[in-house]
Image (cartoon, helix red, strand yellow):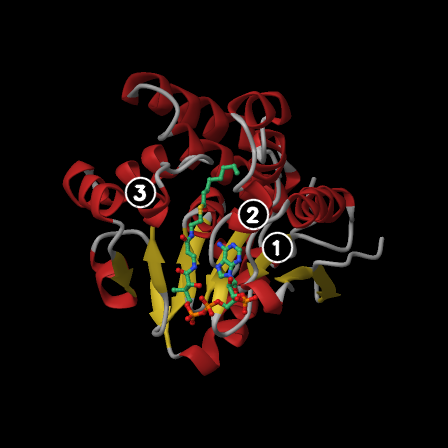
Amino acid sequence: MAYQTLTVEIDDYVALIRLNRPEALNALNSQLMGELAEATAEADRNEKVRCIVLTGSEKAFAAGADIKEMSGKSFVEVYNENIFGDEIDRITATRKPIIAAVSGYALGGGCELAMACDFILCADNAKFGQPEINLGVIAGIGGTQRLTRFVGKSKSMEMHLTGRFMDAAEAERSGLVSRVVPAAKLIPEALATAKKIAEKGQIAVATAKEAVNRAYETTLREGVLFERRSFQALFATEDQKEGMAAFLEKREPQFRDR
Ligand code: CO8
């Protein structure tokens, strides 16, 4: 499908989705969010895709929800439209891993979108923030919940109450991102990481994603039980037999996703 606000390139089982509204620093409007939800669902269905990389431009991953589009709306409108609620739910329902590759600004809804991905790799020029407080509102697509889980209450509260930005070094130190790389290497590094994931057995990949996500959604006891059952279930796959046999025979495994 052709999109107006983003591009999709597929190579080597990796889909690279680039947000593309340079005139507004990739601000998230309803068209972009609708197209992104569709593009991730399409990648999820596509057998030629095993991992997704979501990125923006060098200057901005996304500078937030589109302020021009939402500024005139009433409570009844934003309530009835449930703006971006369905789209972010569809994006987080993607079964294949999504890596956010963040360069430049990831603010407001942009920071929330990055956090809704499975992990964040960022460039050394990245800036994260929840500046909605300066607009008289608060985060609306998960920021108060996800940022708090990532970086803890104190830092999250300060960021939401003051609107200050966090640089790449602080984001890595506080667990918001998995790694920081030089800006020029961000996309190659994200694609190489995605390719590494694409080479694994995809049943184990999907199971690992599901199990790690449980850590955010349930109690420790339930999460550990879920992990244990998932681990046990993987012994029903050919990939488990192949992976362990390959290790013992000192060769590379040939996973077949069965
Ligand atoms: N929405 C719309 N347009 C934007 C946005 C935005 N969020 N951010 C930047 N733009 C536009 C600017 O208006 C400007 O357009 P124009 O040239 O036509 O005036 C263009 O992008 C370039 O921006 P700047 O000239 O401001 O660039 P600077 O380099 O000077 O500054 C900043 C970059 C610091 C990123 C600055 O643009 C900025 O502060 N942007 C707004 C950041 C912000 O407040 N984000 C939070 C938005 S609210 C939100 O995300 C709520 C999420 C919850 C949503 C729930 C459902 C809707």
At label 1, the amino acid type is Ile
- Residue 118 in percent (x, y) is at 47, 46
Task: Indicate which disc, 2 or 3, sits on the residue closer to the N terminus.
Answer: 2
At label 2, the amino acid type is Pro
Front-most of residues 93 and 102: 102
Q: Residue at x 39, y 24 (%)?
A: 217
Q: Residue at x 47, y 42 (%)?
A: 116
**Residue 177 in view (yes/no):** no
- Residue 138 in percent (x, y) is at 36, 36
Badge 1 is on which residue?
A: 52
Judge the density around disc 2: few (<14), some (14-19), many (≥20) Cα neighbours within 10 Å.
many
Q: Nearer the viewer, mark 3 or mark 1?
A: 3
Task: Indicate which disc, 2 or 1, sits on the residue closer to the N terminus.
Answer: 1
The CA span between labels 2 and 3 is 31 Å
Asked if the beta carbon under badge 2 is closer than 8 A to the nearest atom of ligand 1, the reply is: no
The CA span between labels 2 and 1 is 6 Å
Q: Residue at x 45, y 69 (%)?
A: 103
The reply to whether the C-beta atoms of the residues labelled 2 and 1 are less than 8 Å apart is yes
Judge the density around disc 1: few (<14), some (14-19), many (≥20) Cα neighbours within 10 Å.
many
Badge 3 is on which residue?
A: 133
1 vs 223: above or below: below
**Label annotation for residue 28:** none
Task: Indicate which disc, 3 or 1, sits on the residue closer to the N terminus.
Answer: 1
Front-most of residues 199 and 104: 104
Front-most of residues 102 and 75: 75
- Residue 238 in percent (x, y) is at 65, 40
Q: Which element is circle 3 on?
A: helix
When asked about the image quadrant of residue 41, the answer is top right
At label 3, the amino acid type is Ile
103 vs 51: above or below: below
Badge 2 is on which residue?
A: 97
